[in-house]
């Protein structure tokens, strides 16, 4: 079956602009995660959605970052007033049900802020 | 805060030889993952280790978990070129935030002839 998909694959934007990154999880997966991978670093947890529960937004680095998940499926990560330090690869993952299930990752969106 | 340390960060392997990547973590956990990432690609799940003493093997890769030592190892037997990639371990904390994986910085493996 189809894996996690993300769009766009690459995004170049100017400092100060807003960007939206999209994630389509594996069909039927109730848990969805966003991570950020900066050059030379590991993955940094951003946000977690599970079913209809309130998301855990504790990893979002600033109030310029927000995310939503519509209908328990597609998720959008929005970064407002982008800064150069936001440049990174943003990875989305989904898992079948509980938090102990393996997370399956999408291909990522490479964001470059000029 | 759960901290995860991998070493080495870079590993140049010679084909046919054996190597080990280490993953240490700072607080109690019963669940550890190993992922592989090829350049420009996403992460691929390799192993899930769920208990002390767990050992999983797939092909030339074998992973083990010692929860008392807070250590996991990824052992590569008779390295081959197509194992060149970056390998990450990720650790889940105990408790209500057990979905919040903490990743190591990754070990970049290059296998040379």
Image (tube, rainbow, N blue to C red):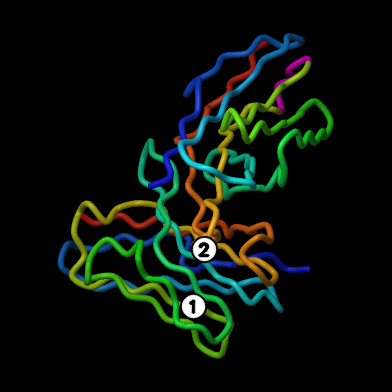
For numbered disc 2, what is the local secondary structure? strand
Residues marked 2 and 1, same chain: yes
Q: Quick one: B95 or A94, which is closer to the camera? A: B95
Residue B2 pos. (x, y %): 43, 45
Q: Could you classify mark 1 by the number of other residues whose Cα lies within 10 Å: few (under 14), some (14-19), or many (20 or more)?
A: many
Q: Which residue is disc 2 drawn over? A: A92
The chain letter for the residue carrying disc 1 is A
Which residue is located at x 75 percent, y 33 percent?
A: B53
Q: Which residue is disc 1 drawn over? A: A75
Which residue is located at x 50 percent, y 22 percent?
A: B7
Q: Identify whether A61 is placed above or below A52.
A: above
Q: Residue A27 has which mark? A: none
Residue A14 pos. (x, y %): 20, 63
Q: Write the start and end of the magenta stretch as one range.
A: B78-82
Q: Identify whether A67 is placed above or below B45.
A: below
Q: Identify whether B23 is placed above or below A57.
A: above
Closer to the N terminus: mark 2 or mark 1?
1
Would you say B86 lies left or right of B54 here?
A: left
Would you say A22 lies left or right of B83 here?
A: left
Q: Quadrant of residue A65?
A: bottom left
For numbered disc 1, what is the local secondary structure? strand
Picture quarter with the C terminus of chain B: top right
- Assess whether mark 1 and mark 2 are in contact (beta carbons under 8 angstroms): yes
Q: Could you classify mark 2 by the number of other residues whose Cα lies within 10 Å: few (under 14), some (14-19), or many (20 or more)?
A: many
Q: Quick one: A102 or B54, which is closer to the camera? A: B54
Type of secondary structure dominating the magenta stretch: loop
Q: Quadrant of residue A107?
A: bottom right
Would you say B111 lies left or right of A10 here?
A: right
Which residue is located at x 78 percent, y 68 percent?
A: A1
Which residue is located at x 78 percent, y 33 percent?
A: B55
């Amino acid at each position: 079956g189809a894996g996690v998909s993300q769009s766009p694959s690459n995004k170049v934007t100017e400092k100060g602009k807003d960007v939206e990154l999209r994630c389509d999880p594996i069909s039927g997966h109730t848990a969805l995660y966003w991570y950020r991978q900066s050059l030379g670093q590991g993955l940094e947890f951003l946000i977690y959605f599970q079913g209809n529960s309130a998301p855990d937004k504790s990893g979002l680095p600033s109030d310029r970052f927000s995310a939503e998940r519509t209908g328990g499926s597609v998720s959008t990560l929005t970064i407002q007033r982008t800064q150069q330090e936001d440049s990174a690869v943003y990875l989305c993952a989904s898992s079948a049900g509980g938090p102990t299930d393996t997370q399956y990752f999408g291909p990522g969106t490479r964001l470059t802020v000029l | 805060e759960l901290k995860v340390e991998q070493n080495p960060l870079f590993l140049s392997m010679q084909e046919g030889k054996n190597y080990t990547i280490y993953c240490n973590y700072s607080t109690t956990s019963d669940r550890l993952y190993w992922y592989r990432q090829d350049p420009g690609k996403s992460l691929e799940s390799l192993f899930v280790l769920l208990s002390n003493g767990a050992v999983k093997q797939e092909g030339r890769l074998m992973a083990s978990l010692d929860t008392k030592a807070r250590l996991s190892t990824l052992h590569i037997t008779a390295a081959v070129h197509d194992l060149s990639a970056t390998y990450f371990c990720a650790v889940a904390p105990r408790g209500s935030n057990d979905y919040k994986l903490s990743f190591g910085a990754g070990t970049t493996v290059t296998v040379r002839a």
